[in-house]
Image: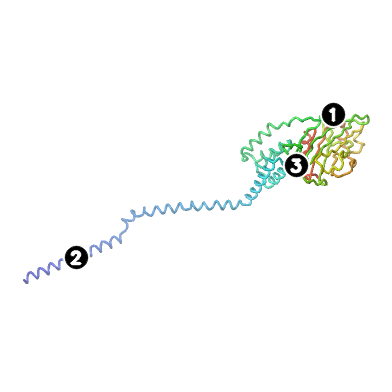
Amino acid sequence: MFRIALWLVAIFGVAELGGLGVFYAGKWRAEYVAAHPKPVAPAVTPAPSAPVVAEKTTPAPATAPSAPTASTQTTPSAAALSVAEKLLKEATELRDKGDTTNALARLQDAAQRDPKNANVLAEMAMIYESIQLYDRSNETWKKILEIGPSAGPLYELADMKLKTGVTPPAPTTTTTGPGLAGTSPLDAGTTGNDADGIPDGSTFGITEVTTTDTPDPDADTNMKLKISVKARPNAPIDHTKVKIQVFFYDTVDNKEVVLTDADVSYEWLTPHHDWKDTNPEILAVTYVRAKNKSSSDADLAVAAASVTPPGTSKKKPAITKPSTTTADAGHRKYLGYIVRIYYNEQLQAVRADPTKLLNLFPPPLTAPQ
């Protein structure tokens, strides 16, 4: 029994020693692994590498906010551009209604705010072309060419317009006198007239201009214009704000075109001339060039008869003494006339014969002071 007990104690001691050996061997191994992580580090590093790449790409979203920053810096020019575009839209609507006078005013304002806006310039050029102011139209097309190819299709259109040019329409002859071509209607305030002959968008229109060349033994030319001016029906009229201008032009030695130095007078053929009735008011303007008149020693009549109704039934313009020029020294001959109607200082209608006078002397949109 003693021996058996001794063997049991010995076996138990060996088991205890074995358990302690296993325990300390595992602890030693854990400490060794913890103290030597190098073998595992290369395998673990690729895992964090993905977030690292993502962090490098994060600046890309950061560039997105930079775009608003750039637009913020261009806000003033964008505001000016928006005003010009608004004016262009208003001008287009007015032009569609036939009110080219106010349409041009809007476009001129837009061009001042945004001089490089090809759309504004093109619209302006086409309106000038539609009212037969070809010189102004060409000047405006040239501005688009100066912008360059950045103007897009309008650059090519401007180049084509300036190369091919525009042929003015043949004048329409309504009344002729000896040696005269008659009248050629041209309404500068619109592209069309209504049934009463009043330009769309205007309060007044020139319904008729007749010319009568009267033989006169004392004059080279004795001619009278009868100008019928009609107001739009049912439109309230302040007759004190109506201005009618008549300009006569001569040729000097059949070359230079100048304002006349002939005697010019006017008279109303209809009483009152306040446009309270629906009938047109008729103004007569007389051009008389005396025989053997020498411009170098004669008084120069005012070139235009400017009327602001109501006035006297007959009136002669003031006489001024001009300085002698080369043009005055030559032989003068009657060429034609321009009639302008203004209301509230705004151009309403224009007639000219021949129409080329409008290219040489384009009418201002507001009445000259």
> Disc 3 or 1, which lies upstream in sequence?
1
Residue 181 sits above or below residue 81 on the image = above
Q: Which residue is mark 1?
A: 177
**Quadrant position of residue 340:** top right
Q: Nearer the viewer, mark 3 or mark 2?
A: 3
At label 1, the amino acid type is: Gly
- Which residue shows up at 32% across the image and 57% down it? 38
Which image quarter is the N terminus in? bottom left
Q: Residue furthest top?
A: 178
Viewer-nearest residue: 353 or 94: 94
Question: Measured from the top left, where is residue 85 in percent x and y?
Answer: 65, 46
For this orientation, the residue located farthest to the bottom is 2
Q: How many marks?
A: 3
> Which percent across, then down, holds residue 282?
84, 38
Label ID, residue 19: 2
Helix, strand, or loop for circle 1?
Answer: loop
Please tell me which of labels 2 and 1 falls first in the chain.
2
Q: Residues within 10 Å of mark 2 (few under 14, many from 20)?
A: few
Amino acid identity at mark 2: Gly
Q: Earlier in the sequence, mark 3 or mark 2?
A: 2
**Residue at image mark 3:** 202
Image depth: mark 3 or mark 1 in front: 3
User: Which residue is located at x 41 percent, y 54 percent?
Assistant: 51
Instruction: Examine the image and state in which quarter residue 16 appears.
Output: bottom left
Of the residues shown, which amino acid type is indicated by label 3? Ser
